[in-house]
Image (cartoon, grey):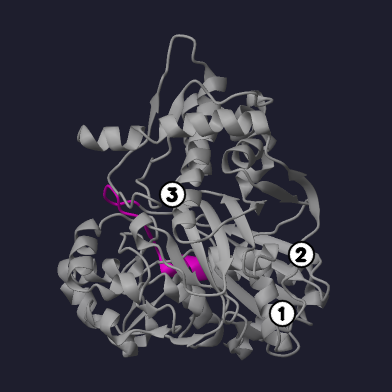
Amino acid sequence: MFIGLDIGTSSVKAILLDENQKLVASATSDLTVQRPHPSWSEQDPDSWWTACETAMDELARTAAGEMAAVKGIGLSGHMHGATLLGAGDKPLRPCILWNDGRSAKQCAELEAAEPKFLSLGGNRVMPGFTAPKLQWVRENEPEIFDKTAKVLLPKDYVRLKLTGEHVGDMSDSAGTLWLDVARRDWSDDLLAATGLTRDHMPRLVEGAESSGQLRPELCRRWGMASAPVVAGGGGDNAASACGVGATTPGSAFVSLGTSGVLFVTNDRFSPNVESAVHAFCHAVPDTWHQMGVILSATDSLNWLAGTLGAKPSDLTEGVGVISRPSDVQFLPYLGGERTPHNDVSIRAGFYGISHETDNRELTHAVLDGVAFALKDCMEALAVAGTSVERVTAVGGGSRSKAWLEIIASLLDVVVDVPADGDFGASLGAARLGQAAAAGTTEGIFTPPPMRTSIEPRPELTSAYSEAYSRWRKLYPALKQAGF
């Protein structure tokens, strides 16, 4: 038996798998995000642990016999969160999350002062990453910075509670901007740029390696006969890739979650900093990946649904069969954008609304706008030398056939849709736990059965190519106008 623990932004999810990776039980516990100031986004680190306790207690209650046989636990979590620990491993302040935008000034200054962030770190310095967050604390909360003994990512704080060990994995740690991504090791120069040393960092392991064992008191609490190993795990997207079997070079997935991701596995470190492509270590050894990331995918649809007083699923079902691009165009920049613009200040908007525009057309425009932003990601990956022919669709938005048809036709790729089941980060985490317990990755990260494959529709590919060309002109026009 194996457990996957996914520390999400809105909830913690725990799943229990058997030796054949069949789901035995699952549990979730909700989380909240605090926004004390505009562009701020924070969480209480201890809320993650409380939510994990709740979810694990539920697994122990509903599947006591199976829990006794657990051999491995894997972790995944939202990346980039700055969790600052002081004496006794106590959090010194709320964690600054991945979607916090307060450190834009520090980003520009760090890029100018230390070019190795682009070369060794392989990524633009963006407010979402961990390093500029620490620089912000250093400048604005010096008393907190001076007390900081360790900096951990969200899932690694949960690991500390599970094992008592300060450990991070390669994929998640690459998102701090302190890692030499090609060498898979901390960079002393990048740490020094933000006033830190290796002593502030956790020990590094590969995602499929053991990082320690579950503490005896927790084994007793959850009824485990022997202490399971806790795998290194991975950042949420790398773990999702493990869940859908995207661990070999060239394999890819598109995620339509709160944010949107186009993820491609590589056999080498392949950055493209000019277009804000993310180039990170994968959660499996000797493997890397590239990501194009947009900040508001289903978030855009959820915003529209809330504004219209409707359910997101009702809106997407109301779109019906896609026969053409929407007459209305939508920029999905509700909280800024990463790939390719690296622009924390740009905001969303509609263009082309008329007297005839109704809820269906607005919804269609949102689906198109997110797809156009993913096309931007595809173009940025192409500049980095990566081509994609087919992707696996994951995330809540993948339930919309209309959305997937738009994406398949616009990106000109085959979109594979898994059979019913959860193929997200929690499954990938459980698989990493299985690999750590077995001491091998062989045969563990297989693709799931597919329910269907959506082919590009030639008539839509042509029409959407023209619509995308028009859509791409909106962002530079807005920036030139001072927005």
Residue 295 — which label?
3
Q: In this orientation, which residue lies closer to the viewer: 15 or 253?
A: 253
Q: In this orientation, which residue lies closer to the viewer: 303 or 471?
A: 471
Specify which label sits upstream in the sequence, 1 or 2: 2
Q: Would you say the residues marked 1 and 3 are in contact, meaning their CB atoms lie under 8 Å apart?
A: no
Q: Residue at x 49, y 82 (%)?
A: 160
Q: Quote the CA–CA distance across marks 1 and 2.
A: 16 Å
Residue 328 — which label?
none
Mark 3 or 2: the one toward you: 3
Q: Residues within 10 Å of mark 1 (few under 14, many from 20)?
A: many
Q: Quote the CA–CA distance across marks 3 and 2.
A: 31 Å
Q: Which residue is mark 2?
A: 25
Amino acid type at circle 3 is Leu
**Magenta stretch?**
35-49
Q: Position of residue 117 (x, y in %)?
A: 30, 72
What secondary structure is found at the residue carrying circle 3? loop
Q: Position of residue 370 (x, y in %)?
A: 50, 39
Q: In this orientation, which residue lies closer to the viewer: 245 or 324?
A: 324
What secondary structure is found at the residue carrying circle 1? helix
Decide whether residue 41 is among the magenta residues. yes
Mark 1 or 2: the one toward you: 1
Seen as rendered, the residue at the extreme top is 355
Q: Residue at x 61, y 43 (%)?
A: 412
Q: Position of residue 390 (x, y in %)?
A: 66, 53
